[in-house]
Amino acid sequence: MANSKQKTPTAKELKEKLFMQKKNAYLRMTDADIKKCEKFCEGYKEFLDSAKTEREAVGFIERAAKAKGFTEFDKNKTYKPGDKVYRVNREKAVVLAVIGKAPITDGVNLIAAHIDSPRLDMKQNPLYEKDELGYFKTHYYGGIKKYQWTTVPLSLHGVIVKSDLTKITVNIGEDENDPVFCVSDLLPHLASAQMKRTAPEIVKGEELNVLVGSRPFKDDEASEAVKLNLLMILNEKYGITEADFLSAELEAVPAFKARDIGFDRSLVGGYGQDDRVCAYTELMAILELKDPKKTAVAVLTDKEETGSDGNTGLRSAYLKYFIADLASSFGACGRDVLSASRCLSADVNAAFDPTFPDVFEKNNACVLNGGVCVTKFTGSRGKSGTSDASAEFVGEVRELLDRKGVIWQTGELGKVDIGGGGTVAAYIANLNVDTIDVGVPVMSMHAPFEITAKADIYAAYKTFEAFVGE
Ligand code: MN
Ligand code: MN
């Protein structure tokens, strides 16, 4: 029965009750939260600087996991609650798990992020000399605006497997005393024809040639003396010959370090934040995890940027096999575990950019400092290729984040029919796992220098911490 004395609410009161509240994370965080957030992001920037490729990320993750008491998973061993295990897949992907108190058949709490990022890969026969300059030929990896990758200092990372099968690790251009490499671009004075090309072709794929040297071997008679001198240097440094490039994986990435952006230092700029921002936050959550109820699993995968195919991408069976082996060590069946599991597909989303607002639908775009972004569905043009989380699972995630006081928002990747994108979510959902995309908003995604907000990074960490802590 209505209380006749109750006065009619004002519009302000009613709005507060009925409208969805959107508030900048800084207006919701305490001073103590902001301090913790800033400290967390210092560790994040170190990770960005020391793990620029999937192989380096796996190395970092394995070292960090071992230091926290994780041991290599042995499917013939029996494990008890609190045990921490990991399995590396071909130095390019890794799965970590913390055994929970609940039976494994209750399912696992899974988080998946990717540790590969767009870059320039060297071709198998990369080295050539043209007009007395030395170059590497490249084939770009992932979706890039090619012109962004010129006139940027590049470092070279990867491995060379020699004919005797010894493996050499390459990392050159990161140390301040190292040389760097670069793709040249035309001066504006002479670029009028180039500037008439359409944007995807302003710099063409076969023009992404990395300058690697210019000094000839001192011999007036020799041809290709610059190439010869470069091979001599490489032979002295690594003991390799030209044929050894055939069995090498060399990746050129921006050589600069991650930095704070802004007078207020509220943003992080750096290479490869898609998706190492989710990889790092996920990693920190599982490394700190103690005695969870359910078993927690974190997968850090390769090849997302090229469609997740190949044995180190999430279309491969390696995750399924890991879960099956984990299940069988408890006498259970892998498919029963997967069918009862739930997953946060941890990947970035496109942050609203006020300079380019037209491609975003503002009611459903994520913003910097809006918190972690929960994306119900991905895909493009009629949700093609989507992984679409059920309302029930979205509800579960929403309840968890609200209960734990995590700052979060929702976001779709751009306006309908403008573009779109996918993540690994579909490949995990296809294993009959409840899966939803959750991640950090990124501005200038896939550019050599991507932008994120510290408050969102910290919110992602709090999300993953809450999820695996259930
Ligand atoms: Mn991504
Ligand atoms: Mn990407």
Image: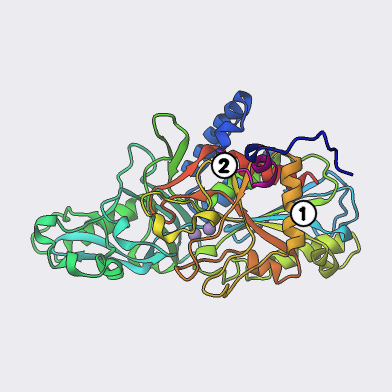
Q: Residue at x 72, y 50 (%)?
A: 398
Res 411 → quadrant: bottom right
Instruction: Give the magenta-colored segment's residue range.
Output: 13-23
Q: Residue at x 80, y 35 (%)?
A: 6
The earlier-in-sequence mark between 1 and 2 is: 1
Q: Is residue 458 above or below residue 91?
A: above
The question of residue 17 being in magenta is answered with yes
Q: In the rendering, at what x and y percent does residue 465 appear?
A: 71, 42
Q: Is residue 222 above or below residue 65?
A: below
Residue on which disc 2 sits: 457
Q: Is residue 432 above or below residue 110?
A: below
Instruction: Name the residue type under label 1.
Output: Glu
Report the side of 351 relative to 139 (left or right): right
Of badges 1 and 2, the one in the foreground is: 1
Compute the Cα span from label 1 to label 2: 22 Å
Frontmost residue, 194 versus 387: 387
SS under mark 1: helix
Q: Residue at x 62, y 27 (%)?
A: 30
The image quadrant where one finds the N terminus is top right
Instruction: Name the residue type under label 2.
Output: Ile
Q: In the rendering, at what x and y percent does residue 119 appear?
A: 41, 58
Furthest residue toward top:
31
Residue on which disc 1 sits: 396
Q: In the rendering, at what x and y percent does residue 251 appear?
A: 41, 58
